[in-house]
Amino acid sequence: MPMPLIDGKQFAQEGLLQVAQHCAQAALHAPQLIGKTEIRMQIVAGQELEDYFRVQDAANKLGARFSGETYKTAYQMGEPPVLLLIGADVTPIVQAPCRAACPAGIDVPRYIRLIGDGRYEEAVAVVRERVPLPSICAYVCHAPCEAKCRRGTLRDRPIAIEALKRFAVDHSRSWEPKGPRAKETGKRVAVIGSGPAGLTAAYYLRKVFGHGVTVFEALAEAGGMMRVGIPQYRLPREILDREIAAIEALGVEIKLNAKQDSVETLLEQGYDAVFVAVGAHRDVRLQVPGEDLPGVIECLSFLREVSLGKKGKVGPRVAVIGGGNAAMDAARTALRLGAKEVSILYRRTRAEMPAYADNVEQALREGVTIQFQFAVSKISRNKPGLKVECLRTECGPIGAYGKSHLKTI
C-alpha cells in the first residue's frame, strides 16, 4: 500500500515514527485539539471518509503519542491515503474546519460529496437539516466556511463552497422539505413576522414539533428583510417565493397585511404561544444637522421602498454614508436606478469596513467609489441638490468593540 505524501515528502512503511515526528512539527494548527493531553496518528487508505476528521477504518495505526497544549495536523487530500492527527479521546466530535466555521453547523463535506455524485436533492436536504431556507443561504451567505477550508491552506485556494451550494439549489428538482413530519399536537402557535427568524421558527414548530402555526406579516408580501432589505440582484424573488411556498406546503398559514400590536390579544384568541420575530427594520440616525432635509433618505427605508416598487429613480449623483452591507446594497441599487455617480463615505479604513469583502469588491467593480476616513458633519441645501460636509478622520487605538477610536483632523 502506498504511503501518504506529507508536505511533498514520501514516507515508507518502516518510517512511521519519522512520519509522526514530521506531523508534530507541521505548520497547520488544529484549535479543536488544544488542551488535550494525548493524540494519536491514523493513516487512512483509500476509503471515502464520512468526515475528514472522523475515521471509519484505518489501514494502519501508529501508537506514537505526543504531549503538549497545542497540537498540529497535516494531511494530503486526493487519491493518496489521507493522514490525520486526531485527539484520541475526541475523535467522534471533532469537526471539519469548514463545518466548524459555519454559524449553522451545516455538514459541508457531506453535501459537497453528494453534489459530486449528482445527488442534488439530497445535498439540498443536508443544508435544510440545519437551515430550513437552503436556497436563501446559497444566495446570500458570506461563506465563512471557505475562509477555513483546508484546501486553501494545503493547496492553492479553498473549495468554492458557496458556488457549489447554489449549483445544487438551482439544479434540485424538488423544493419541498423531505422526511417525516411530527404528529399533530393540537397546539397553536402565532409567529409575528415572516422574515428569516419567523419562517425558521414556523418550519420547526410545524415539521418537527407538529404544532399548528400561523404567521402574521405586517407587509403585503412575506419574507421580511429577505424581501425588502436584500436587493433582487442578490436574492431573486422567485427563489424567495419558492422557499416560502415550501414552508406553506407543510401547513403553515401566512397572513399578510396583518400587523400585530399585542401578544396578549393573540393569546386571548386561543394561541398557546407567541413567537415574536419582528426583525430590525429601524434605521440608524446620523445625528448630524440636515439629515431631515428632503432628499435625504435612510438606507433601510430606501431599500424597502425600492423592493416594494415605491421608488423608481434617483438623482444623477448619490452619496451613501456608511460602510456596512446595507450601504453597499444601497449604492449598487442607486446605480441600477440610473445614478451616474455613486460615492460611499466611510469614516474608517477599508480594513474596518463591516461589509463583506465580496460585497465591497462587487460594488467597486460596478463603478461605486469609496472615500475612506470621511465623517459627515453636516448636510445642507445646495440647489438643485444637497451639499454634504465632511471632516477627515484619523484612526487611533483599537477599542473594546474591535474598532479604532476616531479623531477628526
Image (cartoon, rainbow, N blue to C red):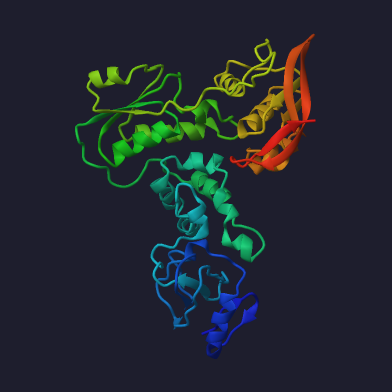
Q: Is residue 58 left or right of residue 141?
A: left
Q: How many marks?
A: 0
Q: Position of residue 277 (x, y in %)?
A: 40, 29
363 or 172, nearer to the observer: 363
**Residue 288 pos. (x, y %):** 68, 18
Q: In this picture, is 177 found above or below 119?
A: above
With 244 as the anchor, is 152 left or right in this view? right
The picture quadrant where one finds residue 10 is: bottom right
Residue at point 22% right, 31% down? 187
- The quadrant of the picture occupied by the C terminus is top right
Residue sitting nearer the eye, 375 or 124:
375
Q: Is residue 247 left or right of residue 221?
A: left
Can the viewer see residue 160?
no
In the rendered image, which quarter is residue 183 located in? top left
Q: Quarter-wise, where is residue 375 in the image? A: top right
Say which of 21 and 238 sits in front.
21
Judge whether 278 appears above or below 297 on screen: below
The residue positioned 53% from the left and 22% from the top of the image is 282
Answer left or right for 374 relative to 402. right
In this rendered view, identify the residue nearer to me: 40 or 171: 40
- x, y (%) of residue 322? 67, 29
Whether 370 is drawn above or below 216: the answer is below
**Location of residue 335 in the rendering, given as x and y in whole percent from the top left corner:** 71, 26
Asked whether residue 328 is in view, the answer is yes
Residue depicted at 48% across the width and 47% down the height: 103
Q: Pick out the residue farthest to the left.
A: 186
